[in-house]
Amino acid sequence: MSEIVTQTQIEEAAEAIRQLTSQRPTIGLVLGSGLGGLADEIENADVIPVAQIPHWPASTAPGHVGRLVIGSFEGHTVIALQGRVHFYEGYSMQQITLPVRVMQALGMQTFIVTNAAGGMNPSYKPGDLMVISNHINMPGMAGNNPLRGPNNDSIGPRFPDLTEPYDPELRDLAQRVAEKEGFKVHEGVYAFVAGPSFETPAEIKFLQMVGGDAVGMSTVPSVIIARHAAIRVLGISTITNMALPNPEPGTQHDHEEVLATGRLAIPRLAALVHGVVAGLQ
């Protein structure tokens, strides 16, 4: 399979979905590690295994079930991706972001993406939620950008602006929803690393020094693709573990910890996403 995704492949995948549902979503949701249960809140849902969609990459990561759920959610038609694929699974940046291109082709105008992340800001604790205000794209700065290759000028410009990759109005809305629901959400910078190994203490110290508040292995490539198409983006991280430069002796991190903490945060995350979607115009 070529690392470059063509417009024909995007259109074929979108058409396959249109053949399986009559619903036309305007809001896209990506549900990250351990957070796929939020899709159970979608009503009148058409559930499509991604294996039925041509050119769609298959996830191999635990906690990512690989289904599209299209239906009604707080008065809007949404398309939710239960599980995502990651760069560390061996796909190219264009392959892992094909789902975003397809959702855009189906009519997505607002993109809400969630993830599990390690907290680098000492004021955070496991189970907290963080609205992403900006990001640091470590693989992208080294050349692994999902926009590498030929540009489709009908979708977006060759050199898209990322001054505000995460929509300020959506971030403000998320803060108001959290306040109304009675819990606090942080706002901070998400540092994207390739994985799959967890970061060393030295790497965490570096990422803190350059302004990172949380670190994870997803989201940023999808956000770049969405912003290339002028889609509004809201990013929400669940802080599933602390990633600090001076860990206690014997400290170890594993994916089961990520999944377990993610499950604990689901009620607040669900309330936040419900409130944000309900508040969209």
Image (cartoon, rainbow, N blue to C red):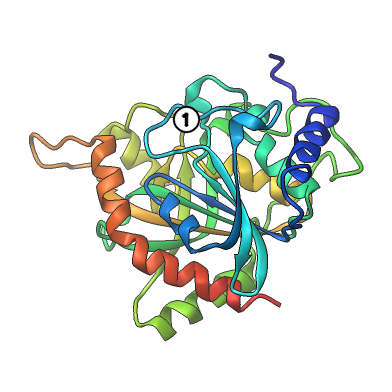
Tag 1 residue: 194
Point out the residue furthest to the bottom here: 180
Q: Residue at x 43, y 72 (%)?
A: 271
The residue that appears at 46% across and 38% down in the rendered structure is: 65
Q: Is residue 242 visible?
A: no
Against 132, residue 73 (above or below) is below
Screen quadrant of the C terminus? bottom right
240 left or right, relative to 17: left
Give the vertical position of 101 relative to 131 (above or below). above
Q: Residue 40 appears at what percent x and percent y?
A: 46, 58
Instruction: Name the residue rendered at 36%, 61% in the picture.
Output: 266
The residue at 32%/32% (across/down) is: 198
Three-letter code, disc 1: Ala
Image coords of residue 270 (percent x, y) = 43, 66
| Quadrant position of residue 57 | top right
Residues 199 and 64: in front is 64
Measuring from the top left, give residue 152's x and y in whole percent: 87, 36
Which residue occupies the foreground of this view, 230 or 29?
Answer: 29
| Residue 147 pos. (x, y %) | 73, 34
